[in-house]
Image (cartoon, rainbow, N blue to C red):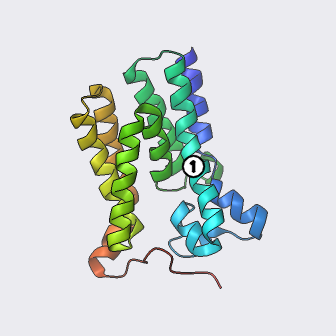
Amino acid sequence: MKLYLLIAISYLLGSIPTGYIIGKVFYKDDVRKYGSGNIGMSNVFRTFGPLPALFTFLGDALKGYLPVTLAIWWHFNSYQVSIIAFFAILGHIFSIYLKFKGGKGIATTFGILFAINFWIGLLVGIVWILTLFITKYVSLGSLFATFSSTLFSIIFKIDISYTYLFIIIFLLSLYTHRGNIRRLIQGKEIRFGQKVRQ
């Protein structure tokens, strides 16, 4: 019973559209009207600035961190924790509060990674930052980061259920970034920090 309850909580929590709420409450504007049309941290940064973007990232990360940490505290096995984590990301991507549309799940993924294994979360974060610093593309950093999570899970020899989870997250990341991948190939992708709202 606890498992099904936490799965439901994880999805509903994951569905909370942090970036959308910040835009509406503090700027009386809809972040989805600008840039990529996404509600995530990078589009909030382009639209409203660094501080709202930081709070968006933290809020979205907590959506993954809290249910996974609770599941671990309740001594669920790794397979069950992975299911709970998956529903947090699913909620973020297909938010019930936004007619099953949402973000790309990257910040929520970071929350999950840090809850499961701090060092993997840290290393994946470094991959994301380095890729962003070198290329100036958030989307490329996100794809490299999610891919690297699988590699680090193998290197650290953590439970195989988590490796499978990270593979699924990477595949979801490819899906949610399909438009970005197309724009990267065409040379039309928006670089990090480029303002889209005057």
Query: Is 148 situated left or right of 92 in this image?
Result: left
Choose top left, top right, bottom left or bottom right for residue 136: bottom left
Query: Residue 193: horizontal and vertical position, in percent?
Result: 51, 76
* Horizontal side of residue 173 vs 100, given as left or right: left
Q: Amino acid at mark 1?
A: Asp
190 with respect to 47 (left or right): left
- Where residue 33 sits in the image (x, y, percent)? 61, 74
Residue shown at 32% from the left, 68% from the top: 181
The answer to whether residue 178 is above or below residue 18 is below
- Where residue 20 sits in the image (x, y, percent)? 66, 60
Name the residue rendered at 40%, 33% in the picture.
117
Residue 48 locus on image (x, y percent): 65, 72
Residue at the location (33% across, 64% down)?
A: 131
Q: With respect to residue 69, does 147 lie above or below?
A: below
Q: Nearer the viewer, residue 11 or 192?
A: 192
Check the image and report above or below for 7 versus 36. above
Q: Which residue is mark 1?
A: 60
